[in-house]
Image: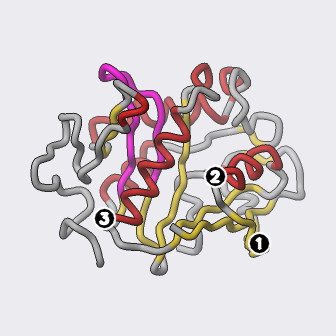
Amino acid sequence: MESSSARSDRDTQTSDHPNKPMAGGDDTATVGATGLTPLPATGALTFRAATPADVEALVGLVESAYRGDSSKQGWTTEADILGGRRTGADDVGACIDRPESVVLIAQRDGELLACAHIAIEDGAGYFGMFSVSPTLQGGGIGKALMAEAERVVRDEWQLPVMRMTVIDIRDELIAFYERRGYVRTGIKKPFPYGDARFGEPKRDDLRFEVLEKSL
C-alpha cells in the first residue's frame, strides 16, 4: 500500500473528533480512543488509537514490513520494487494529529503488532499504512485489524465505503484485498517519481490503483 503521506487525492461520527475518547473508553485501556474493542475471537489482541508517543515505534513497524531485508520475512515487502524510506515521523505524526483521522494499533500484552491509518476523505473511509510485523504475517492479525478499521468507519463514522490505493503490480496484495471484499475500480493514479518521501523506485512502471469496498 502507498506511503502514509501518499493518500488518495489529498460528520457523521459518534464522537465530535475521532481522536477523542468515547464514553467508557480511554487511550490506554482495552477500549481505545475511538471506542475500539477487542475481537473476542482473537483473545488478547486489542486495539487502540495511536498517540504522539507511539510515532517512533510505528515508523519502525512500517519500515520493517515494507523495506529492507527484514521485510522479506513477510509477504508484504516492497523491497524488490522500492528502496529508501516507506514513511517517517513527520508522516505518521500528521496522520495522528489530523482531524477526522486515526492511526489504529493492534497490540497484545502492550506489544505493537500491527497498525493502519483510517481517515474521512471525500465522503468515504480511507485505509492506508497497513502494516503487520513481518514475522507475524499470515496469522490473522491483519485481518482482525482490517475488520476493526471497517467497523469504525461503518458504525462510528457512518460512512458507506472504504477506499485505498495499492501499487497496481502488487498482484498478491491486491488478491488479498479482493478476498476481503475490495474491488478494483480501474482508477489509476500516478506514482510520485522524484519525491523521496515515497521511496526510491527500482522500476519505471509503478502506478497506484484505487480499490474500494461497500461497508
Q: Considering depth in this image, is 87 or 207 the residue closer to the camera?
A: 207
Q: Amino acid at mark 1?
A: Lys
Cβ–Cβ below 8 Å for labels 1 and 3? no
Tell me where residue 58 appears, x and y as whole percent: 43, 36
Q: Dot 1, how many residues are within 10 Å of its Cα: few (below 14), some (14-19), or many (20+)?
A: some
Front position among marks 1 and 2: 2
Per the rendered image, the range of residues in magenta is: 102-117
| Amino acid bearing label 3 | Glu
Q: On the picture, is 76 further left or further right than 125?
A: right
Q: Which residue is mark 1?
A: 188
Report the Cα–Cα distance between label 2 and label 3. Answer: 20 Å
Question: For numbered disc 1, what is the local secondary structure?
Answer: strand
In this view, the mark in front (1 or 3): 3
Q: Is residue 26 left or right of residue 13?
A: left
Helix, strand or loop at disc 3?
helix
- In the drawing, does residue 26 fall left or right of residue 165? left
Quadrant housing residue 68: top right
Q: Which of 142/43 is in front?
A: 43
Mark earlier in primary sequence (1, 3) = 3
**In the image, residue 106 lies in the stretch drawn in magenta:** yes
The tag earlier along the polypeptide, 2 or 3, is: 3
Q: Residue furthest left?
A: 24
Q: Main secondary structure of the magenta part?
A: strand
Q: Which residue is mark 2?
A: 180
Q: Is residue 175 above or below residue 54?
A: below
Q: Which mark is residue 53?
A: none
**How far apart, in angstroms, are the residues tagged by discs 1 and 3?**
29 Å
Residue sitting nearer the eye, 120 or 6: 120
Question: Where residue 156 is drawn, which disc sits there?
Answer: 3
Q: Residue at x 85, y 44 (%)?
A: 202
Q: Is residue 69 above or below residue 26?
A: above
